Amino acid sequence: MPRIPAIITNSIIYLYGDQDAADTGEDFGGSGFLFSIEATPKPASHLYAITAAHVIHNGFTVVRINLRHDSSRQERTESLPFTKDNWIIDPINDLAVCPLPPDFNPLKFSFSVVDKRFLISRDDFVGNDIGPGDEVVYIGRFKQHAGKFMNMPSVRFGHISMNPSEEEPIIYELCGKEKRQTAFLVEARSRSGYSGSPVFTLNQHAINNRRAVFPMFDMRLLGIDFYHLTEEIKLSNVGYSVEYKAEVHAGMMGVVPAWYLLDLLANSPRIAEQQKRDEEYYASQAMTQGEFDMPAIPLVQHYAEEMSGKTINVITSTEANKLAFPQKPMKAEPPSSD
């Protein structure tokens, strides 16, 4: 079996209903991941939390991220108390995006980010002939053992069963309402709690080593887990006329294609306004450059000496990615809902 590296699993975040639920590790909520887009002035970046829209509609808006504790070498968590107003909801697809505040201090946290160039576009989908049988990996929150004191995402595997069709969207029911979503069907046993999880394609290139996974070459973001399909079965006791009905997992999950996330990020007026505000903020701050020239195998890269040698991981494609943040650590506040 392939060995999925920590640079992938560390991009996962958990979503909770409120601060108390996040602090106690309640079973209710969803999953998501951290995402970055290069900003101006370079090498700054815009950071986002990504999840499924229905997770936000259900009230799970607070983001929990693992903290970095150098002294004890133990990870704990801190939550960003976002509200529904902070999240940007796709009007068509089951996707939600929340900008992290421009003064978010990455040195406090232990995490990776998925770079925009890591997403599969429409052209990638066609050009790489992605389709049924291709292996996928998805990472999220297994609610019964998600981690009370720290995020402990679990990795699950599957295969594409059917490609998306805009003419034939998946029809499903959510909160008593009929929904339609153009999506991949993936043969995998997703479950409640994984909603919003990133789903990656996996196409290993290492010869004679099926464990070796090089994210830059072997993995791309296929999309976001939004639904696990169920089917109805009938049960009856032998010798009795009483019949029972029950819903069971159909062994399929729906995945919103990554290119719809690219569309949302490119076309949302709120995101354009937020990026403009953030870049004005970056331009007004003294910046320390942290360069991440990602090698063939993405290893942990280091900030310059001024940043005390702290590390942050970036999941990117074959191009180098750069990040920078204000030198002065500032308190993280939810972004404005203007």
Image (tube, rainbow, N blue to C red):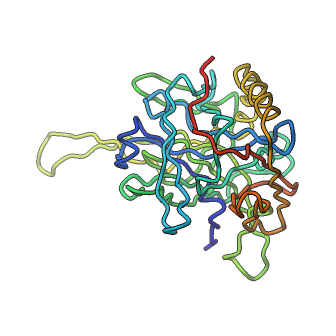
Identify the residue shown where x is 48% and y is 33%: 61
Identify the residue shown where x is 16% and y is 49%: 237
Q: Nearer the viewer, residue 129 or 220?
A: 220
x then y, percent, for residue 13: 54, 48
Q: Is residue 201 above or below residue 211?
A: above
Q: Residue 217 vs residue 30: left or right?
A: right
Q: Quadrant of the N terminus?
A: bottom right
x then y, percent, for residue 148: 37, 55
x then y, percent, for residue 71: 52, 67
Q: Is residue 173 above or below residue 255?
A: above
Total numbered labels placed on residues in the image = 0
Q: Nearer the viewer, residue 321 or 117?
A: 321
Identify the residue shown where x is 52% and y is 69%: 73
Q: Nearer the viewer, residue 281 or 63?
A: 281
Q: Residue 99 vs residue 232: left or right?
A: right
Identify the residue shown where x is 38% and y is 46%: 23
Farthest residue in the left direction?
239
Q: Quadrant of the C terminus?
A: top right
x then y, percent, for residue 226: 54, 39
Q: Is residue 255 above or below residue 202?
A: above
Q: On the image, which quarter does residue 325 sit in? A: top right
Farthest residue in the bottom direction?
208
